């Protein structure tokens, strides 16, 4: 008889789902201030007035999406007057996709026919809002993905102008951005800026104690008691702080317990954590790479290939090599390097003197970068 494989070993997990990136935590600590500021901004909509537009800004893994989900859940339980629409711009990144999502939220089904024009979509949305005196609250999550080719401006403008076109209709937007240096005033088209008038809510990175608190709570929910000793949790917290993204911590926890379970052990030890780390880090890599455009991906891939051959990565020498692959001027090249640095894909050392070349280091394993950036 073959040995049963699937159900053979003891289960160390109580509930694996709590480690999914999309899991909505039941307790959500450390973001009371942000939730309160969001509530203030949205409140006028409860009384049928126009909500204040807001920008949520913080590096990935700081709880922006979770806050939006939290507040939207509360809105759905409280009122039918506000129509919350949460769009993940990594997936839905055209105007048509966004308006179809709004339509679906209002009417409960997708717009009829695939070829319905933007104008007709907007008319149906605007009329329903005006007739029902309802307020559209649109969240464009990871809105930075929409900046290239002016998609963000083209999407925001008609939404923000709905009240003028359809008297009685009200609308407000929440923009969540992960790029700390992205200057929306500069990136958005001139007519959009004065109608947006958004205030910013900042999501600073979690400190070590907060990361520990969040991971410990997930651990209690998802894993049987005693499986992960305190000392091991300390190692996981330390590694999470090192790469600065809570999502890596969650993934590292899940993979470490999985490794121990696969080995038939009753508890996690350090040798379950270390091999899990490299793989867990790739969670951020793939999330971050998704935001890059095609040329940026090609440039990053080419840099990773360079790093496999050369010991040192000096910015001038790297430029000479990557521009064969992706033709571009030095200024654009340098802008992109700085962007990769901000996105924590690479690190750039501080120049010793003005005009000096800079040393570059990839923050991820070069082979994984090549894989993630694709052909
Ligand atoms: N304060 C918190 N308490 C519990 N879990 C949190 C908290 N903040 C973030 N998380 C978890 O961390 C992960 C990343 O959060 P997310 O809201 O997706 O961040 P962002 O949208 O800023 O990238 C999610 O799995 C989320 O459940
Ligand atoms: Mg998010």
Image (spheres, rainbow, N blue to C red):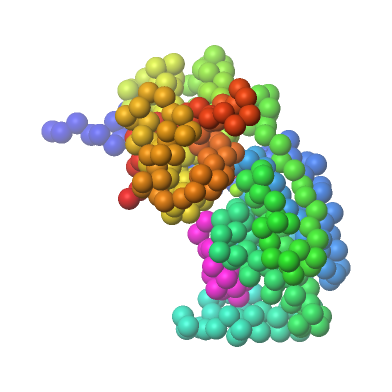
Extreme residue toward the top, this view: 231
Which residue is depicted at the point 67% across and 32% down?
206
Residue in the picture at 29% in, 37% down: 6
Which x, y percent locates residue 25?
A: 62, 42
| Residue in view at x 78 percent, y 77 percent | 163
**Extreme-front residue of the structure:** 355
Residue 20 lies in the magenta stretch? no
Highlighted magenta segment, given as a residue range: 88-103
Compared across the picture, whether 320 is left or right of 77 comes to left
Say whether residue 27 is left or right of residue 312. Answer: right
**76 left or right of 47?**
left
**To which quarter of the image does residue 243 belong?**
top right
Tally of numbered discs = 0
Left or right, 130 with respect to 188, comes to right
Image height of 164 relative to 356, above or below: below
Occupied quadrant, residue 85: bottom right
* Residue 174 rendering spot, x and y as whole percentages: 71, 58
Q: Is residue 94 located in the magenta-colored stretch of the structure?
A: yes
In-front residue for pair 24/200 = 200
> Which residue is at a point 44% across and 39% down the rendered structure image?
319
Is residue 369 at least partly visible in the picture?
no
């Amino acid at each position: 008889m073959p040995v049963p494989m699937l159900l053979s070993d003891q289960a160390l997990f109580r509930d694996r789902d709590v480690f999914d990136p999309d899991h909505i935590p039941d307790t959500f600590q450390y973001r009371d201030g942000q939730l309160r500021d969001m509530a203030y901004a949205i409140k006028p909509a409860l009384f049928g007035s126009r909500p204040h537009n807001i920008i949520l800004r913080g590096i990935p893994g700081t709880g922006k999406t979770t806050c939006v989900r939290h507040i939207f859940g509360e809105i759905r339980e409280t009122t039918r007057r506000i129509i919350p629409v949460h769009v993940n711009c990594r997936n839905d990144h055209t105007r048509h996709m966004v308006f179809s999502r709004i339509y679906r939220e209002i009417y409960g089904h997708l717009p009829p026919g695939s070829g319905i024009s933007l104008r007709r979509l907007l008319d149906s949305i605007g009329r329903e809002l005006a007739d029902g005196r309802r307020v559209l609250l649109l969240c464009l999550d990871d809105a930075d993905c929409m900046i290239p080719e002016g998609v963000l401006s083209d999407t925001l403008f008609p939404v923000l102008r709905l009240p003028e076109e359809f008297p009685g209709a009200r609308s407000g937007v929440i923009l969540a951005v992960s790029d700390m240096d992205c200057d929306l005033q500069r990136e958005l088209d001139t007519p959009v800026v004065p109608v947006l008038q958004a205030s910013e809510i900042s999501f600073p990175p979690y400190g070590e104690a907060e990361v520990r608190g969040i991971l410990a709570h997930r651990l209690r929910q998802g894993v049987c008691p005693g499986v992960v000793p305190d000392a091991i949790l300390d190692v996981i917290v330390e590694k999470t702080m090192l790469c600065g993204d809570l999502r890596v911590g969650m993934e590292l926890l899940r993979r470490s317990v999985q490794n121990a379970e696969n080995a038939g052990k009753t508890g996690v030890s350090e040798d379950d954590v270390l091999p899990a780390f490299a793989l867990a880090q790739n969670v951020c890599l793939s999330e971050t790479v998704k935001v890059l455009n095609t040329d940026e991906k090609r440039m990053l891939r080419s840099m990773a290939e360079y790093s496999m051959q050369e010991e040192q990565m000096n910015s001038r020498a790297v430029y000479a090599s990557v521009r064969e692959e992706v033709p571009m001027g030095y200024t654009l090249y340098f802008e992109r390097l700085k962007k990769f640095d901000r996105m924590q894909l690479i690190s750039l050392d501080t120049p010793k003197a003005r005009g000096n070349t800079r040393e570059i280091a990839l923050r991820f394993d070069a082979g994984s970068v090549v894989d993630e950036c694709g052909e």
